[in-house]
Image (cartoon, grey):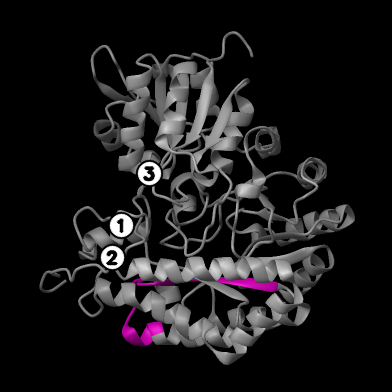
Amino acid sequence: MTADVMKTLFINPPSFEGFDGGAGSRYQARREIRSFWYPTWLAQPAAMVPGSRLVDAPPDGLTVEHVAPLAKDYELAVLHTSTPSFRNDAKFAALLKEINPDIIVGMVGAHVGVLPLPSLEAAPAVDWVAVGEFDYTCLDVASRRPLAEVPGIAYRDRASGAIALTPPRPKIENMDALPSVIDVYKRDLTIENYFIGYLQHPYVSLYTGRGCRSRCTFCLWPQTIGGHHYRVRSADSVEAEMTRAKSYFPQVREFFFDDDTFTDDLPRAEEIARRLGRLGITWSCNAKAIVPRKTLEIMKANGLRLLLVGYESGNQQILNNIKKGVRLDIARRFSRDAKELGITIHGTFILGLPGETPETIRETIRFACEVEPDTIQVSLAAPYPGTELYRQAQEQGWLRNEQGELVDGHGIQTAALSYPHLSSTMIFNSLEEFYRKFYFRPRKMFSLFSGMVRDPQVMKRRLREGAEFFRFLRERKTTTPPEPKVPAGV
């Protein structure tokens, strides 16, 4: 290890059992079935700091007792935090300081990036938090640069106790300059511990770019860290990385590109697809429900298996309210094209967005049954700090409580919003109704059962996931939110 670089530990801390807090996904919570995304946001700076180590506690089943003693052996700890896990993460940071009073503790993630000063005030053991992208920030701190001289942080002066902000750090434009994360994956992670219900196991996920051109009011990352300019790695860089990834992980059945919207740049998506086709890789990605058939044909012919599509709602006015930039007729045509081409669709939906009513919920359920994704994920509208949805909720008095809790004590997502015409309890209960009406149809049950019969591995996995799903639904029944008192006139 380079002598002038701190011995650095990157940590996705232990939290609620099964809680995917370090994920790059829109929602940090316990999933309906055991699911873990890769800690790519931490792996990137870990790849830049010589001699560092990445510990991803949740998928490895590591507890506080397993991870905290590592503080004795390190000079710098960088913790990824999120709004739902922040309180637990602050306690974990304090424990690291108890074990090693000399360790410098930093926090990264959207929550501290949006609320840097309140975060430091609420977490006395934390020395600094990152504001914006934090890859080079972590490298600067690890290189022993004085905190006052590190752009893009808020920090605590230990001598005076004062908290200060440094000048902002510009966004990274040359994405090819960042080292690959797969070396860190190979060194520090057990890829078999990462599960996503709709991806083949084992899988590996990574980014080919950051940012999203869409303006969805609820979406966390573009409004906090990634931005709305899609900054990408070159096709040459992606091809080189995937060539190495294929050799590193011969057991991997699928690679997932976790860019917010991989299809934002259609010519680039088509070019990368052709290169992946030559490599013989099975892959999947995020996409908006507006991809033209020509592009779908090229991607499918070159190894594409699945698209993760955020449909969100089956009501056009709600889509307009959240600035989704999608028309339902286009989404229907896209879905037909994908199905005809044999592309698997995992559709995501959100209940409780602005404009939601009991009737629009029924509309969305009908729409989901009509477009017939192969699998679905239903979430509750989550007003994360830093998003337009959060600002709207504060202004309109939609937050169910002053704390705006997004998960309960077990890490299960709560209904954080409540409207005069639609209570949080109704929103919360509608999630189970959605799942049951979508999956408990004869046609859908026959389709799932047929897939299980054809592949014993699929059968084994689906039976496990089914048991986890019903356990999840039973747990939700114990956390139904109390009816809030909505101010008159709101």
Tell me the number on the disc at residue 111: 3
Vertical placement of 158 versus 288: above or below? above
Element type where label 3 sits in the image: helix
Which residue type does callout 1 highlight? Answer: Asp
Residue at label 1? 408
Give the amino acid type for the residue marked by disc 2 in the picture: Thr
- Percent x, y for residue 490? 16, 71
Q: Position of residue 253 (x, y in %)?
A: 75, 56
Tell me where residue 419 sits by quadrant: bottom left
Disc 1, SS: loop
Label 3 packing within 10 angstroms: few (<14), some (14-19), many (20+): many
Q: The residue tagged with tag 2: helix, strand or loop?
A: loop
Quadrant in which residue 143 is drawn: top right
Confirm or deny contact between disc 1 and disc 2 (CB under 8 A): yes
Q: Is residue 312 above or below residue 370?
A: above
Q: How many residues crowd mark 1 within 10 Å: few (<14), some (14–19), many (20+)?
A: some
Question: Which is nearer the N-term, disc 3 or disc 1?
Answer: 3
Q: Position of residue 8 (x, y in %)?
A: 52, 22
Q: Nearer the viewer, residue 477 or 399?
A: 477
Determine which of the numbered discs, if any, sits on residue 479 in the image. Answer: 2
